Amino acid sequence: IFLTAFASVSSIIVDAIFCILLFVIVLQEVKAIANAVKKKKLKKYIKSLWFLLEVVIICAGVGIAAGYWYQNLLREGIVDSYKAVVDAQIQDLPADTNEQGVELAGKAESMRVFTSYFR
């Protein structure tokens, strides 16, 4: 399990570029739809193959961005649980008196399941 969200600054930059380009594509599509409405050719525009392709690209991009966002939330939960387990060990608390280890295992399993289907 990787406990950091980004391996380096370059991965943050690549993710930012992806989100910016996705936003640009969405803006271009909204502008094209507005122009089609203005020209009263919306039905023709929606029936075009290019429109379908752009919708698929936008939906896939949003799905990918949402999936990585959710994966990062799961990762942060694992890090918090891991820190709680380490703190309990430092305090020398017996494992049978707390549920932190079980909670950590459950969160790790949830992330494993999600990432196996997401990737």
Image: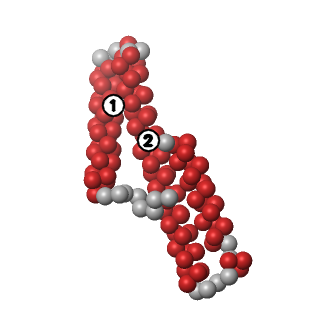
Residue 37: x, y in percent?
A: 34, 21
Instruction: Tell me: 8 left or right of 2.
Output: left
The mark that comes first in sequence, 1 or 2, is 1
Q: Element at badge 1? A: helix
Work out whether 6 lies above or below 85: above
Q: Name the residue beneath numbered marker 2.
A: 64
Work out whether 107 lies above or below 93: above
For the question of whether residue 42 can be seen, the reply is no
In the image, what residue occupies the spot 29% across and 39% down? 21
| Neighbours of disc 1 within 10 Å: few (<14), some (14-19), many (20+) | few
How was the colour assigned to the protein in this rendering?
Answer: secondary structure
Q: Element at badge 2? A: helix
Work out whether 25 lies above or below 114: above
| Mark 1 or 2: the one toward you | 2
Specify the quadrant of the image occupied by residue 59: top left
C-alpha gap between disc 1 and disc 2: 20 Å
The amino acid on which the numbered mark 1 sits, given as a three-letter code, is Val
Tag count? 2
Residue ranking furthest to the top: 44
In the image, what residue occupies the spot 62% across and 63% down? 105
Residue 87: x, y in percent?
A: 55, 80
Q: Name the residue beneath numbered marker 1.
A: 30
Residue ranking furthest to the right: 96
Work out whether 41 lies above or below 100: above
Instruction: Find residue 53 and name its label.
Output: none
In the image, what residue occupies the spot 52% across and 73% down? 83
The amino acid on which the numbered mark 2 sits, given as a three-letter code, is Ile
